[in-house]
Image (cartoon, helix red, strand yellow):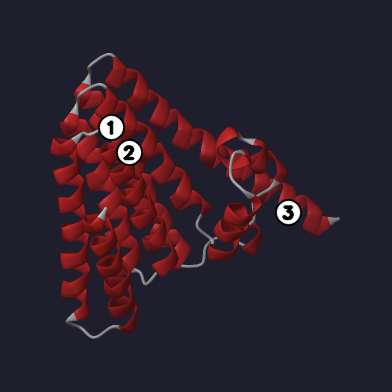
Amino acid sequence: LRQKLKNMAVHRRQVDWVEAIELLADIGLSTLKQKDKESANNSMLSLYTIACWYVSAKRAEVFPSAWFKLGSKLKARSDFSALSDITVEGIVQQRTWVEWKILRSYQLLFETAASLNSPQVAGLAAFYTRKLGELAAENGDLHSLEVSVKFLNTFIRYLINNKMIRTLSGVLNEYRELAAGIMQQSVNLRQSSMQAAAVVAAAVVAATDS
């Protein structure tokens, strides 16, 4: 019973985190539609600030193992309920649901900005997506890095499908910056950095071939 109560408390905290992330994303989306670019940018910066704190806490093993499993309330929320069982299983195994949720928020902001012909704001969403990838690589979290790369791929597919070439060049540049940053880390011969560099290098080739 005691363990069950602990898990319930963890699951409530999960919902609190998701609601905070969604609130920031909603503020960004609302202000973006009102052409208030500065406030939209601030919401993206706030999401990144949360991510920075979370990555540090995660590395310090602050969170219990139950934190990385999706509780029933979390699974019922729209973003997670729309995912396939295989995707959900991968997020749980790789312990990346918070990173995924923040990156999903950047995706919504990116696509909204692109559709509103605001390439500068869309570029910032891609920029922060790249920064999260760098942050993951610096901390040896290859799974979170892969999630960032997957979202950058999603951005590229969206832009290609909608023939938004000017914005596309900016996203491809974020790929290059991510690869360059990780390669610089690899000078220290850290195994995680070498693996991360391989992940991004393969992604850059795939994105360019697109």
Give the distance between the C-alpha atoms of the residues marked 2 and 1, in whole angstroms.
6 Å
For mark 2, does the 10 Å Cα neighbourhood hold few (<14), some (14 to 19), or many (20 or more) residues? some
Q: Can you give x and y, in whole percent of width and height, for residue 101 in the image?
A: 47, 44
Query: The disc labelled 1 sits on which kind of residue?
Result: Asn
For mark 3, does the 10 Å Cα neighbourhood hold few (<14), some (14 to 19), or many (20 or more) residues? few
Q: Are marks 3 and 2 in contact (CB under 8 Å)?
A: no
Q: Can you give x and y, in whole percent of width and height, for residue 31 in the image?
A: 30, 19
Say what secondary structure mark 3 lies in. helix
Say what secondary structure mark 2 lies in. helix
- Quadrant assignment, res 126: top left
For mark 1, does the 10 Å Cα neighbourhood hold few (<14), some (14 to 19), or many (20 or more) residues? few
Q: Residue at x 54, y 61 (%)?
A: 95
Q: Are marks 2 and 1 in contact (CB under 8 Å)?
A: yes
Name the residue that disc number 2 marks. 158
Q: Residue at x 34, y 53 (%)?
A: 52
Q: Is residue 95 left or right of residue 6?
A: left
Give the distance between the C-alpha atoms of the residues marked 3 and 2, in whole angstroms.
41 Å
Name the residue that disc number 3 marks. 6
The answer to which of marks 3 and 2 sits earlier in the sequence is 3
Which is more toward the observer, 156 or 11?
156
Query: The disc labelled 3 sits on which kind of residue?
Result: Lys
Name the residue that disc number 1 marks. 162
- Quadrant assignment, res 23: top left
Q: Can you give x and y, in whole percent of width and height, for residue 106 in the image?
A: 35, 39
Q: Is residue 8 left or right of residue 28?
A: right
